[in-house]
Image (tube, rainbow, N blue to C red):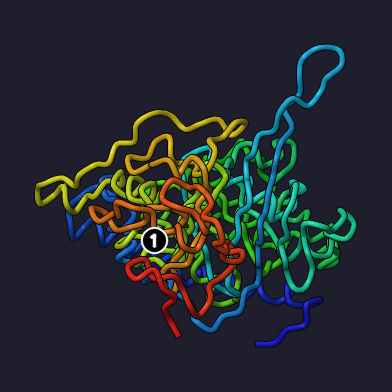
Amino acid sequence: MTQDPNTRAEVEPTEIGANAAETGERRLEDTHDVTADHEVPIGDLDFAAVAEHGHVAAERDPDAPAVLTVDNLKMYFPVKSSGLVRRTIGQVQAVDGISFEVPKGGSLGLVGESGCGKSTTGRLITRLYTPTGGSMMFEGQDLAKLSNREMKPLRRDVQMIFQDPYTSLNPRHTVGTIVGAPLEVHNIVPKKQVIPRVKELLEVVGLNPEHYNRYPNEFSGGQRQRIGIARALTLNPKILVADEPVSALDVSIQAQVVNLLQDIQREFDVAFLFIAHDLAIVRHFCPEIAVMYLGKIVEIGDRETIYSHPHHPYTQALLSAVPDVKQAAVGGRRERIRLEGDVPSPINPPSGCRFRTRCQFAQEICAKVEPPLLQIGKRHKVACHFAGELGAHPATPVTTEILGVDDQGSAVPGATPAARLSIPGYEKTWYDLDTKQTAGA
């Protein structure tokens, strides 16, 4: 449905509120039915079990164009020396050359352990940080190169749900002021209509609309996160960066909020960059997942490929750590891959592959040459010299021919390395690991 961008925010919250009022009660009833049927307290269920009684997992539209294209994005934080004259003595390489696309109306999940650069990536996209390098193309404009004044009109289209519901809300402002501030800043509605609009948005996220005059300290952590979601939805954004949006909520409430985000995504074509630690939630909400490690994307692909056929040793170790409630119920335990050592410092990351210091397959080439994020399937990329399925990693590097090096990582005389490989999105052809030839249409 085509809408006037100047009037869309005046109409849509009412529609959302009506849908939320209707579906909210149904979700609560569904949750009650789950506990009644299984006679198990809701806290003993995992997200996947609860989600089965809500919406089905989100699916990808294969024809959707990219609403956001991130290319070689970098963010280095300077490290200053102590003393009277403070000099830059190093840099924290929080994000170092990542590339990906977020489809219009779709969602990309970003996972990885703490400190890998997920939240920094989200803050870069919303321009809370100014990137050190790279580009972020959104509707023909590079967000990385816009000034604060030039960014203001675009901020209504690029919003964020913050990770910490306690520090992201001003304790001196009421909920009505917090949620209504974007409406006033962007002059969306007359001042006398701000409070009615705030009440509608609070109803959308499952809060009592009459509590608009309360302060954040009067709400629980989960309720505060819902307030943050309401604030992010105020301007009906085109892309929403959700940084751990449900980590503060109980399992049953997580399912309700994720279902709510799916409703909003389908009805208003909102794209999501969904950052989370809970791989079950990411699997349900995101048709495509990117795995980060120490500022780099090491593997990216569609849901089925990443969860069933991961090729990077780090992705395999990450998935092996996910508790499997169903498997525990029937007995047996999935083999856990334990990584040795600690995560290196982003101030002085390892040369070549950043995961090599903890990888059991690492060889000399891994220290000399950084593996490119190579497309190895229709919608699958991996950055590893020894990429392969669990238990089938090759004994020799698979990237030597395209990089023009030998098995030790030394340049081969006369060899011509392939052009830049780590690009956003997917191409129609890819590199087949078995034949080491180009495959695809």
Which residue occupies the foreground of this view, 48 or 29?
Answer: 48
Q: Residue at x 78, y 27 (%)?
A: 88
Q: Quadrant of residue 90?
A: top right
With respect to residue 156, does 437 lie above or below? below
Q: Position of residue 350 (x, y in %)?
A: 53, 35
Residue reaching furthest to the front: 413
Q: Residue at x 30, y 65 (%)?
A: 52
Kind of residue indicated by mark 1: Arg
Q: How many marks?
A: 1
Q: Position of residue 154 (x, y in %)?
A: 79, 64
Which residue occupies the foreground of this view, 13 or 123?
Answer: 123
Going by the image, does 355 lie left or right of 127? left
> Which residue position is annotated with label 1?
283
With respect to residue 387, does 128 lie above or below? above
Q: Residue at x 60, y 37 (%)?
A: 166
Going by the image, does 236 lie left or right of 438? right
Going by the image, does 331 lie left or right of 326? left
Q: Quadrant of residue 202?
A: bottom right
Going by the image, does 369 lie left or right of 70? left
